[in-house]
């Protein structure tokens, strides 16, 4: 695909990263043209297109020009019709703009306070440093809605240098939810061009090259030319030739998961749906697991815990055909927990579940479907009983 335009910038500019990441999510290309500050951005040709001489500066293929990184990122995010990066409603779009404002008005001044002294550009100011420590990020899976938007991209790229130069492990310990959100983002494939999770798992590390195309990066040893055997190109397989999921090749079961989901949705849970489930459940073709969230001590408001469950379900979309479950938030604000039960096709936890970024945040315990206590607890979690395991029911979400 031909690039939609060019971004002029100096190397390792994090303000360019948000536009490049947005392009990755939209499946489009943007060319990056290296700029030698003080020279190439002061030429008559450059100033004719961009009178302020500032970078990043964007030039579309039709001659349309933009400067200011937020305007460029918005243009790239909006380029694809039906994109999810800008929200699904006017309210979500407004919230995205709110967090972009947070990045500009709160994080950027904090960068000047913290990073400029480290770089030797200005003296330290202790009062501003304390102000910069305020947590401006909400404890949601993502900043707006249940998927990554331009708000997440903008705020995360504004935090890149903080994680590079300021946020040591001791400081991060006070912001566990922010760390989990940040590490979730930098592990998305679209972010791979500028950041990756560090070896320690809780500390993000970033290549010195930054989010840059090859022409702006120093060649690495592994990138030097080498002799290779020329491969003969083979045609891409047709859609019908794709290998089937191993779960689709299992022997047919009398327990039909889709039929169960419909019956559960259209009938009273107790006793009708519960009785139907246990009458038809096939332990040879399906597995029953209890799930417990590992970080209950970090949960605060119950609605935020419920939002966390919603984000988990969103990232489980690939497993929807092979799973059914109910996760409940039990307790009250500042004292709640998340647990529940899931039914999976096959013997064990499907790869589609294990491949999600949330997998390591849960304890999975395989259950005996013939155990009366297990059956009663399963019934309680799918029926949303007012009290479950001695705890007050707050909210729940069903994955079906």
Image (spheres, rainbow, N blue to C red):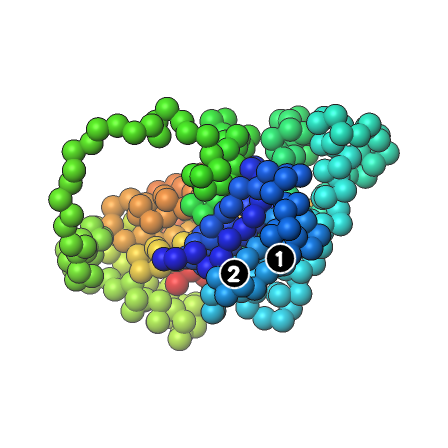
- Residue 308 numbered mark, or none: none
Q: Which residue: 39% across, 49% down?
A: 374
Q: Residue at the bottom extreme?
A: 266
Which SS class for mark 2? strand
Q: Residue at the right extreme?
A: 127
Q: Residues within 10 Å of mark 2 (few under 14, many from 20)?
A: some
Q: Is residue 327 above or below residue 119?
A: below
What distance separates the C-alpha of mark 1 from that of mark 2? 11 Å
> Contact (CB < 8 A) between labels 1 and 2?
no
- Residue 49 numbered mark, or none: 1
Q: Nearer the viewer, mark 1 or mark 2?
A: 1
The residue closer to the viewer here, 309 or 240, is 240
Residue 273's spot in the image, x, y percent? Answer: 37, 68
The residue closer to the viewer here, 90 or 80, is 80
Query: Taking the image as drawn, is residue 352 in sight?
Result: yes
Residue 318's spot in the image, x, y percent? Answer: 35, 56
Residue 112's spot in the image, x, y percent? Answer: 75, 37
Q: Earlier in the sequence, mark 1 or mark 2?
A: 1
Which SS class for mark 1? helix
Q: Quadrant of the N terminus?
A: bottom left
The residue closer to the viewer here, 78 or 239, is 78
Q: Residues within 10 Å of mark 1 (few under 14, many from 20)?
A: some
Query: Taking the image as drawn, is residue 285 in sight?
Result: no
Q: Quadrant of the C terminus?
A: bottom left
Direction from residue 312 to residue 259 in the image, left or right: left
Residue 129's spot in the image, x, y percent? Answer: 80, 34
Q: Which residue: 40% across, 74% down?
A: 267
Q: Which residue: 53% across, 42% down?
A: 34
The residue closer to the viewer here, 257 or 186, is 186
Q: Which residue is mark 2?
A: 60
Q: Is residue 231 above or below residue 316?
A: above
């Amino acid at each position: 695909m031909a690039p939609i335009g060019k971004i002029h910038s100096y190397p390792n500019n994090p303000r360019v990263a948000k536009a490049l990441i947005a392009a990755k999510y939209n499946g489009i290309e943007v060319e990056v043209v290296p700029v030698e500050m003080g020279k190439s951005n002061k030429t008559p040709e450059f100033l004719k297109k961009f009178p302020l001489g500032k970078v990043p500066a964007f030039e579309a293929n039709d001659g349309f020009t933009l400067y200011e990184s937020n305007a460029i990122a918005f243009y790239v995010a909006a380029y694809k019709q039906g994109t999810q990066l800008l929200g699904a409603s006017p309210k979500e779009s407004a919230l995205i703009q709110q967090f972009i404002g947070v990045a500009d008005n709160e994080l950027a001044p904090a960068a000047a306070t913290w990073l400029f002294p480290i770089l030797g550009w200005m003296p330290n100011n202790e009062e501003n440093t304390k102000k910069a420590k305020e947590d401006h990020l909400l404890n949601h899976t993502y900043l707006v809605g249940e998927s990554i938007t331009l708000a997440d991209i903008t705020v995360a790229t504004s935090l890149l240098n903080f994680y590079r130069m300021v946020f040591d492990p001791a400081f991060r310990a006070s912001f566990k939810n922010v760390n989990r959100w940040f590490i979730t983002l930098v592990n998305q494939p679209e972010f791979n061009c500028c950041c990756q999770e560090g070896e320690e798992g809780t500390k993000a590390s970033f290549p010195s090259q930054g989010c840059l195309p090859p022409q702006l990066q120093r060649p690495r040893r592994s990138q030097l030319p080498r002799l290779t055997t020329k491969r003969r190109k083979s045609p891409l397989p047709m859609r019908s030739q794709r290998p089937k999921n191993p779960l689709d090749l299992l022997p047919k079961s009398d327990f039909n998961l889709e039929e169960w989901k419909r019956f559960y949705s259209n009938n009273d849970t107790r006793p009708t749906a519960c009785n139907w489930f246990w009458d038809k459940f096939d332990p040879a073709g399906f597995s029953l697991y209890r799930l417990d969230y590992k970080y209950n001590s970090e949960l605060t408001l119950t609605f935020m815990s419920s939002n966390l469950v919603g984000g988990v379900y969103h990232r489980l979309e690939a497993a929807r055909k092979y799973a059914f479950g109910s996760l409940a938030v039990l307790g009250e604000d500042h004292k709640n927990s998340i647990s529940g039960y899931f039914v999976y096709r096959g013997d064990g936890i499907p790869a589609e579940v294990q491949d999600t970024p949330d997998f390591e945040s849960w304890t999975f315990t395989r259950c005996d479907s013939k155990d009366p206590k297990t059956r009663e607890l399963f019934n309680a979690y799918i029926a949303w009983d007012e009290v479950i395991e001695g705890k007050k029911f707050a909210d729940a979400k069903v994955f079906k």
